[in-house]
Image (cartoon, helix red, strand yellow):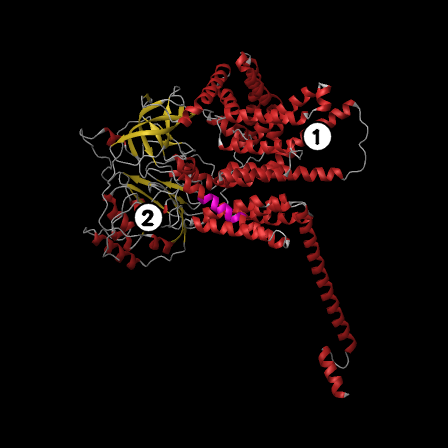
Amino acid sequence: MAGGGSRERLRWGTTPGGNEAGETRFRQRVAAAALALGRVERLGLWLGASLEREIDAGIGFLWLPVGFALGVLLYFAAPSEPFGPALFALSLGAWGISWRARHARAGLLYTALGVAMIASGMAAMKLRTDRLATPMIERQVTGTLSGWVEHRDARRGGYRLTVRVAAFEGRRSVTMPERVTVTVRGRAAPMVGDGISALVQLRPPSGPALPGSYDFGRNAFFEGIGATGFAYGAPKRAEIGPAPFAIRLMRPLEDLREAIRAEILDTLQGDTARIATALIIGDAGGISEAAEDDLRQSGLAHILSVSGLHMVLVAGAVFWSVRALLAFVPGLALRRPIKKWAALAALAVTGFYLLISGLDVAAQRSFIMTAVAFLAILLDRRAISMRNVAIAALIVLAIAPESILSASFQMSFAATMALVAGFEALAAARSKRVLPRPEMSTIGRGFRWAIVLVGGLALTSLLGGLGSTPFALYHFQRMAPLSIVANVLAMPLTDFLVMPMALISVIVMPFGFAAPLLQLMGVGIDGMLGVARLVSEWSAGSGGAAMPSAVALMIFVAGFLWLSLMRQRWRLVGLAPMLVGGALALTPERPEVLVAADGRMVGLRDEEGRYRLVARKVDDFIADIWLRSDGDPRDPKAPTLMQGTTCDGLGCVGRLADGRILALTLDRAAFEEDCRRAQLLVTPLVAPAACYQRIVVIDRPMLERTGSLALLARQVAAAPDAAREADAAAVTGAFDTPADGPPIDITDLAVNDRTPLDEDRGDDATRYEALETPLLARRTPNDEDLPPVMQLNQEAQHQDDPETTRPAMQAAERDFIGRTAYPATRRPWMPPVPQRPEAVSSGG
């Protein structure tokens, strides 16, 4: 018995005097464990029941376009080009498993469907890329271009022409793409279908101005544009035969659009006319920069692009007008499906609006979304539902899967999802109300409807902003803090005056009664511009933010999708990743050094945390993107951007925040000195091998492989003075010149003590040699070249490559954490790496 009692005490963990207390604690632990297990079991049952209810409600279908879009994103994220047959085999296999599992457990079925949609997205994007295979020029060229005008858009001071190329004659032999864009100055421009000939300067579409930013080259590839540039002087008519059939087919439609444009410009003036043109025929070019800034700052810029808002307003006006007119005929209203007739009329008018709006990609997407809603009415289904949004997304992605990367696709579908989910939740809450509404007087009902109108506009703006603002911050580094106020004030004008008058004016235009209606439309546009101007003044200097990381955006989107698509209470779990993504967006990566892809401009972060530009001539296009990505409101032409930078004819120098010297070398004569004094050297030339022995070098061969660069400085210990002097002497000896001593302070460098870079070309230089220079054209925010208005004698640059070149990436990685615009393996839409003869260097 004694032994048994001892074992009993050991087992319960008690002493002879504490048996009862030990037993109590043990029972408490067992009870707590059982309670925890019960809670876990109830949680599992609740999750399973919620999932079953979601599946019964058809929520699984809503996630199919998400899987397809994820596959497209995985295709673009792949470090090298996927193998097409492997993608198609994976897709077919996953669909086969899904078919076999259609009667199996729901978990297996939806897993197989998810894999099938992801594989289908990758395969569709691969097929799209291979089918386009847009040829693109590799370098800048100047010559005589002949071709047919395929499309034209108004721009400030001129037009942008999309030209189907017939022939190109220049000093350099190049493989000319099928389609190019050319900017011309002047009010007169050739019409669509005209054959033209012009002296032009063409270049490849620009890549990302900094890693992770918008890729103009990728967008041009999928639009079939192989080059962009500008024309010297006005294009001349050319007899080059009939235009291709597709262009001839579009000619009557373009003539109609131009007739509408002429009517608008004859009736209205200035920005009012340009905005009316944007709303009716989809051409927003020519709007003044001040008006664009006001609309953007106030959150009303979405009005300028023919999108879902315009399609819905036009379709809604036609639908309710036709249905109301038919309702006046009792025989039709009682015996015929007048609702479906009205839907057909609205669908037809919306299709016509799509045609005259220029068939822009955003307009096509909006038409598809609107058409799905009216087709639902024809099939006796709900017109506005998340299922219809999913169907529209699947159709759009199947036609143009690359649109998933565009800001317009992301913002329009995110805003639509937020609106549908928000109003569905509001409708569900209202359906639970059991108390009847109290009787009100006429004044009370009017007051209530006014509150409902204002509240509805505010709620619409709030929900749409919640969905679209994260994408606006990522793509444009800008949001409108007072957009709700601007939309509440301006949208009644747009909804009840501007768009109805636009619709009616187009209908009566053939009968000559459009002018009064256009004038009424102009009154509404002027009021909208007044609201934009007022709200932009209230929010001046606010709304800018540094570009968040793609990871932060993806985390936010994951939570947003869960919150929007799910129906049960667990949809609120989506708020957690949305908050995490928002927090990550507030702490973006801030590179210390930015290098332009051509090696002619560098951005250095100073002690105040803002960028200084190191360049002899600032590229406003790139500088604007750099500043916006950093949340910096300064203008690219601000003189403070060049403070602390010293330039002369051979290059420029500047300091990093940690004191290290950067040299921008623009002439080969400066290499000897810059390689001794600087710790980082950037040049559009090919640096001598001796420079790599001591300093970090970013030269033309590296930039041709990487594109633009973003560098985060590592903490590097300063070298002892003796070592620095020895390294400087070694580099100097490699150039066979006397040593001047160790590197000196940047302030000791004179500004004008070097020979100028400009050289006399002589009288025997051809006109092409005088024109071909990267400094001729200025670029717009859409990567469009503006024809030059300056003298044509420009700077020459040494193009001689040394026989020995060495990669500098390993040296750069020792001192910096680098981000590159292009991966090591180029994808089809990226410019190829120029092939250079390899040589073995004896330098270290």
| Magenta-tinted stretch | 117-126
Quadrant containing the C terminus is bottom left
Residue 628, above or below 820: above
Identify which residue, 87 or 562, lies in the foreground: 87
Identify which residue, 745 or 221, lies in the foreground: 221
Quadrant assignment, res 724: bottom left
Label 2 residue SS: helix
**How far from the left and from the top, in percent, is residue 272?**
51, 20
Instruction: Classify residue 792 as left or right of residue 106.
Output: left
Question: Which badge, 1 or 2, comes first in the chain's sequence?
Answer: 1
Instruction: Classify residue 163 as left or right of residue 551.
Output: left
Magenta stretch, overall SS: helix
Residue 122 colored in magenta in the image = yes
Residue 255 shows in this picture? yes
**Which amino acid lies under the numbered mark 2 shown in the image of this protein?**
Met
Label 1 residue SS: helix
Query: Alpha-carbon distance for marks 1 and 2?
Result: 61 Å
Residue placed furthest toward the top: 512
Residue 302, above or below 259: below
How many other residues sit within 10 Å of disc 1, few (<14), some (14-19) or many (≥20)? few
Identify which residue, 260 or 517, lies in the foreground: 260
Residue placed furthest toward the bottom: 2
Residue 490 shows in this picture? no
Quadrant containing the N terminus is bottom right
Quadrant assignment, res 829: top left
Tag shown at residue 702? 2
**Which amino acid lies under the numbered mark 1 shown in the image of this protein?**
Val
Residue 3 colored in magenta in the image = no
Tag shown at residue 452? 1
**How far from the left and from the top, in percent, is residue 370?**
59, 31
Tag shown at residue 722? none
